[in-house]
């Protein structure tokens, strides 16, 4: 009986830990959606929750933001964030603020997905590396941000857009 309970507990923890960890393939799938509602459904099934939205206009995308494991103390903090940038109903761009280990997994999978580094830049508070393959442009950004309880921390951002 104890083994079964331990197995169930381990399975639940594993499911929660992997839900926030979107892969590069997941980001590709989100970015090529012709209907944003499909992305909304996929993310909510994985445990993400709606955070906010902003209606676009002729010059700006509509944006839907999702959070994973939002802080009970302050709703502006979460384990991971994802935003869909939408033109009409089609997703054009995905921004993902990921945990460090997920960021590294995605970074290490770029060559296998046909990405080549095309540029990099240093700015105040962040460094950005630009990649591209035949279908997408991708930016990896490491930035200094404010921590939930004060101080600073490094955030890991992945921005994927259609060419």
Image (cartoon, helix red, strand yellow):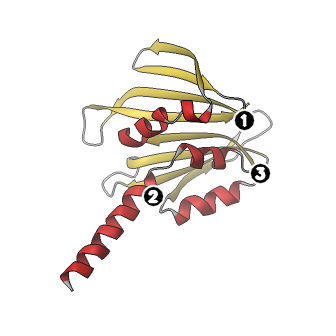
* CB under 8 Å between discs 1 and 2: no
Q: Residue 124 falls in which quadrant of the image?
A: top left
Circle 1 residue: 60
Which residue is the site of mark 3?
A: 34
Percent x, y of residue 63: 64, 45
Which residue lies at the image location 64% right of the left edge and 49% below the top edge? Answer: 30
Rounded to the nearest angstrom, the CA distance separating label 1 from label 2 is 30 Å
Count every numbered label the image shows and give the total.
3
The tag earlier along the polypeptide, 1 or 2, is 2
| Mark 2, residue position | 19
Mark pair 2, 3: CA separation: 23 Å
Q: Residues within 10 Å of mark 3 (few under 14, many from 20)?
A: some
Q: Position of residue 37 (x, y in %)?
A: 69, 59
Horizontal side of residue 86 vs 49, given as left or right: right
**Residue at x 56% of width, y 34% of height:** 112
Frontmost of labels 1 and 2 is: 2
């Amino acid at each position: 009986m104890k083994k079964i309970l331990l197995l169930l507990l381990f399975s639940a923890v594993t499911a929660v830990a992997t839900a926030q960890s979107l892969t590069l393939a997941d980001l590709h799938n989100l970015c090529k959606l012709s209907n944003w509602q499909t992305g909304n459904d996929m993310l909510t099934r994985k445990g993400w929750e709606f955070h906010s939205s902003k209606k676009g206009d002729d010059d700006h995308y509509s944006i839907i933001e999702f959070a994973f494991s939002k802080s009970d103390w302050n709703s502006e903090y979460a384990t991971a964030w994802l935003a869909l940038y939408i033109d009409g109903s089609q997703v054009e761009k995905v921004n993902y603020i990921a945990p460090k280990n997920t960021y590294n997994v995605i970074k290490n999978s770029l060559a296998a997905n046909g990405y080549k580094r095309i540029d990099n830049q240093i700015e105040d508070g962040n460094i950005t590396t630009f990649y591209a393959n035949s279908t997408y442009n991708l930016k990896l950004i490491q930035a200094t941000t404010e921590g939930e309880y004060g101080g600073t921390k490094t955030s890991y951002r992945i921005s994927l857009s259609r060419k």
